[in-house]
Structure formats: structure tokens, C-alpha cells
Image (spheres, coloured by chain):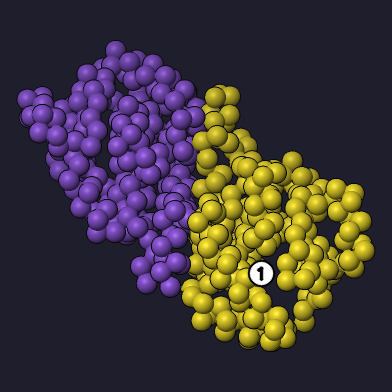
Chain colours: A purple, B yellow
Amino acid sequence: MKRNKGKLIVLSGPSGAGKSTVIAELLKRRDDISFSVSATTRQPRPGETDGVNYYFKTTGQFESMIAAGEFLEHACYAGNHYGTPRRPIEEQLAAGRNVILDIEVQGAFQVRSAMPEAPLVFLCPPNMDELERRLRGRGTDAEDKMLIRLETAKGELKLAREYDYIVINDVAEEAAAELDAIITAEQCRAADRIEFITEE
Amino acid sequence: MKRNKGKLIVLSGPSGAGKSTVIAELLKRRDDISFSVSATTRQPRPGETDGVNYYFKTTGQFESMIAAGEFLEHACYAGNHYGTPRRPIEEQLAAGRNVILDIEVQGAFQVRSAMPEAPLVFLCPPNMDELERRLRGRGTDAEDKMLIRLETAKGELKLAREYDYIVINDVAEEAAAELDAIITAEQCRAADRIEFITEE
């Protein structure tokens, strides 16, 4: 008997919170969830692969996709475009699979408008010193860009209360375990499960 | 750093859904949660111990406790009184521990009125045939009482949609794992966690 519907889980939070690492841990724990690959105009970081981490697009390509209505959400962040292609998500959910999005804060609220049933999870660093340490450690941004990210992060932390859940990423495995529990709990939502008990 | 508040979790559902078994499994999985012992005027079943499974009371004792305002909720169910003593719960929550209640459906909605932040979990049997099998297998009720329980259960299943979560108890260990995830997820609620990130 099928008892779970595919759920869209939105993970966002400041740059440096560790979203990619936590998602990688989550995918080790569950095989019923797919990562939604976003499109972006930012440059690939070392180790990032087109089509795996992001679809890397030129600004022109990205703007054509916006015009064609191909995004569930899109936002401009620190001078780059980021967007979530709509169709792959709709296909996964229709097949009963869960999908996790790694998106910026602005995008998270756009997804909530489009799909109010999708839980929003805010991933945050244990404290601001640790966030700064992680951003510097990445070593991919010039100092001025790093300072912009840090100031943006402070503003984003104030939005955490608007999310459904907050996960504090001190140890990635523990943060992933909490995210795992959130997905399981969301699958137990009465509104989704009621049909499985009234059918019988 | 303390990041979790004590949560009150309400587990209810029809008689025969397996609430006691699932709670026993849950208590094996987590050491941060206590079982709230209810008071009742019903007779102990074989193996039940006063002060462990229930506080067994006479009708007179129970009515005195009602008059003294000692119950968080109380209800009359299949001819017996059931009630949740308030003070032990308040003490556990204040100490940061989680508390789980095993209560009848009427009582669950009383708890929601008194403590709207407490999640309500509906535990249900996989189907009505299995429920009947479990009630008969228990062998503690006369046939007429068993039929009353079965009819009551059918009515209660219709209330499941009013709960926050539904857990289907096919295999007790799996149901306990879902309940475990629900508690972890509830501890990640933004409304509760926001103070731990804005304090810093």
C-alpha cells in the first residue's frame, strides 16, 4: 500500500551555512529523494560540475528561460542569477519521489507562494564567527564579495523565523539527520495521509 | 548550547491501534522523553501496574481530582473515566524534557485547546479487520464492550484529519520510528528555535 506522497523540501539559508554538504549527507541517508539541480549564471567553483551541482548558464540563456516560464522561482543574488527549473520537479513529485531544493532566501518565499504545502527549512551556521570562517576558508571570493555575502547573511538570519523549520549546522551529519526526520514527519502530515486511511 | 525545548506530544487513536506498544518502542529509541501516566477508573488489564501504566482510581477519587482542577484533560470513554494529571507534565516541560501522552480522542482536542503548540498524532490500525482482530485477541472485553469499542473506533477514524500527523501502525517498530522523526522535526520548528540563533 502506497502511503507517502512526493514532497518538495526547500532548504535555504545564508551562503556558508553548508547547504551542499548537508544535502550530500541527506542523500546518503535516503534513497527516496532527488536533488533539484538549479540553474545559475555564477561561475563554477573548483570541483563543481555542470548538470550535477548547477546548470551553468550565460545571462542571455538564463533570461530566455525566464521569458519561457521555465522557472519555479528565480532570484538575483550577489550579482548572479539563480533559478529552479520547474518541469523536472513536477515530474518527480508526480512519480511519488521527494525533491530537495537548495535555494537562496528570496527564492524560498517564491516557492512558498507557488506551492504552500512545501516545507521551508532554514539552515544556519552555529554562529557568525563560524560563518565568516567558512566563507573565508572557501577562498573562492574576493574580499569585497565575501563582505557582501557576510552582510547579506546577517540580514537573512532575521528571516529565519518565517520558515517552518530551523536546522543549525554544527556537524553536517547531525544536521542531515534532523533534515531526514523533518522529511519523514512531513510525510506523516494528516492532510496527506488521510486518504490512505479513509480509502479502506 | 541548549537548542531544544521540552515538547508535549499527544498520541491518540482508537482502542486497539497499539498506542502502548508503539510508546514502549519509542521509549527504547529516545531517552529525552517521558511517558505521562494517566489516571483511569477502568479495571487494570493483566500485566498492568498501578503508577506505571495508569493510576487506577475509584470513581469517587477521580471526581475529587476533577473538582480540584488536577487534570489537563479528562474524558469518559466506554463507561470509564480517563484523565491526564497536569502537574507532572508541567514539571517535565519546564525541565526541558519531552512528554508523550497516550489519550483518548476526546482528550486530545482538550489538550489542543489548553496547549495549542502540542502536536497531535493519530495512531491508526492498518485496516478495520486488523483492528477487530487486535481487540478480540486482547480477550479482556466482553463481546458487547468489544462491539462498542469497534463502533467508537469507526467514528474516531473520521476525526483523524483534524490531527497534525497520522501514523499507521502496521509494524510497531516502524510506527515508533515515524513518531521519533515527528518529535525531532517538532523540535526543529522555527518558532521554537529562533531564539537560539538570534541570541548569538
B167 to B144, vertically: above or below:
above
Name the chain under label 1.
B
Q: Quadrant of the N terminus of chain A?
A: bottom left
A17 to A141, vertically: above or below:
below
Lateral position of residue A56 relative to residue B22, left or right? left
Q: Position of residue B46 (x, y in %)?
A: 77, 82
A71 to A148, vertically: above or below:
below
A84 to B195, vertically: above or below:
below
The quadrant in which residue A42 appears is top left
Q: Position of residue A131 (x, y in %)?
A: 42, 26
Report the front residue among A87 and B106: B106
* Residue B63 seen by the camera: yes
Give the residue displayed 19% in from the left and 26% down from the top: A81
Report the front residue among A196 and A175: A196
Lateral position of residue B181 relative to residue A35, left or right? right
Which residue has dot 1 on it? B20
Q: Residue furthest top?
A: A144
Report the front residue among B112 and B1: B112
Give the residue displayed 32% in from the left and 59% down from the top: A32
Helix, strand or loop at mark 1: helix
Report the front residue among A73 and B57: B57
Q: Quadrant of the C terminus of chain A?
A: bottom left
The quadrant in which residue A56 appears is top left
Give the residue displayed 55% in from the left and 34% down from the top: B191
Amino acid at circle 1 = Ser
* Residue B175 seen by the camera: no
Give the residue displayed 43% in from the left and 20% down from the top: A154
Lateral position of residue A19 relative to residue A69, left or right? right
Count of marks, rendered view = 1
Q: Position of residue B37 (x, y in %)?
A: 77, 61
